[in-house]
Image (cartoon, rainbow, N blue to C red):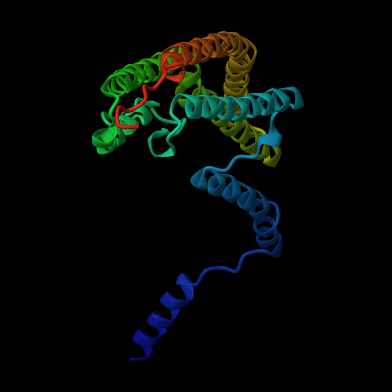
Amino acid sequence: MATTGTLQWSCVHKTRRRPRRKSQTRKKSFGVPMFGIKKLAYQFGRAVGYTDPTALPQQVQARCQDCEGYREALVEACEAMLQIMQGNPAFTPPVNSAQHCECPKGTAPSEMFEKSLESVKGFWHDEELMSMCSKQCNLIAAKQREFQNRGRRQLHITRTFINTVYFEYEDLKRTLLRSKEDLELAQEELKKGENMFRKRTVKKANEKYEADLRALEAFLTGTIPGQKIEHLKEIEAMMSEIQSYHEWISSYCSPLASYKVTQPPNL
């Protein structure tokens, strides 16, 4: 029995782990956790979709702010033109859509006015005036739909920029910010101790960052200026379209304004 107890005690004694040295514990407690917290913050930022735009060079930041402000101004201009083409708020589409603003059948203002004429038709003796009003209302409604369709197509490049091209810019910027974070993480790892793997990682991350930076700068200095010129041309053409539409409406309303109503026979 004594021999068995001695063997058990010796086995337990052999399996005990030696306590770590204070220097080892201190080395693990300091230096690594700070980097771990920073890395965790980067990973959390990616998970929620947040990236720090101030990490980019100042010149690139200024161009990004200009691009973002330009889109906001373009959205406001597009909203104003949609309200001109479609005065009814119930049928005015949002800017970030296909922007189909044609009036549904029977909902154009002139068509609704024509319907109201039917209710007073029995009280009017001048049938010629009633017929003329009905005809002009149909022509105005058709012309308004044509104007809405032409205006929508006139702003094709502008609408495409708002709904498609601008999001290409956001993707390029997001990719660049992530490349910058990867580069900073690789550099932090290299500070802990140099080796071939970490040096290669930093070099690869730096090449990726430089390539993404060139891609964003090419978009901001090449694509955006060309887009601005095309948008200006479209807005100028749209102003001409609006002017010609209102001139046409005026010419079709003038016969009604100058029409002389005959005196009823019983008066």
Q: Nearer the viewer, residue 205 or 258?
A: 258
Would you identify the image quadrant in which residue 223 lies? Answer: top right
The tally of labels here is: 0
Give the left or right position of residue 116, taking residue 180 as reference. left
The answer to whether residue 107 shows anywhere in this view is no
Query: At x 68% / y 25%, what residue is drawn?
Result: 66
Residue 203: x percent and y percent?
A: 62, 23
Q: Position of residue 265 (x, y in %)?
A: 30, 27
Outermost residue on the bottom side: it is: 1
Of residues 50 and 26, the one drawn nearer to the viewer in this rendering: 50
Toward the viewer: 193 or 148?
148
**Would you say 80 lies left or right of 26 here?**
left
User: At which x and y percent is residue 257?
Assistant: 46, 19
Res 191 → quadrant? top right
Quadrant of the rendering where the N terminus is positioned = bottom left
Spot occupied by residue 6 in the image (x, y as percentages of width and height): 41, 84
- In the displayed structure, would residue 196 be above or below residue 234? below
Which residue is depicted at the point 36% across and 25% down?
263
Q: Is residue 24 left or right of residue 134?
A: right
Instruction: Pick the quarter of the image with the C terminus.
Output: top left
User: Residue at the spot x=62%, y=27% of the render?
Assistant: 73
Residue 9 appears left or right of 60: left
Is residue 59 placed above or below 123 in the rendered structure?
A: above
Q: Is residue 225 visible?
A: yes
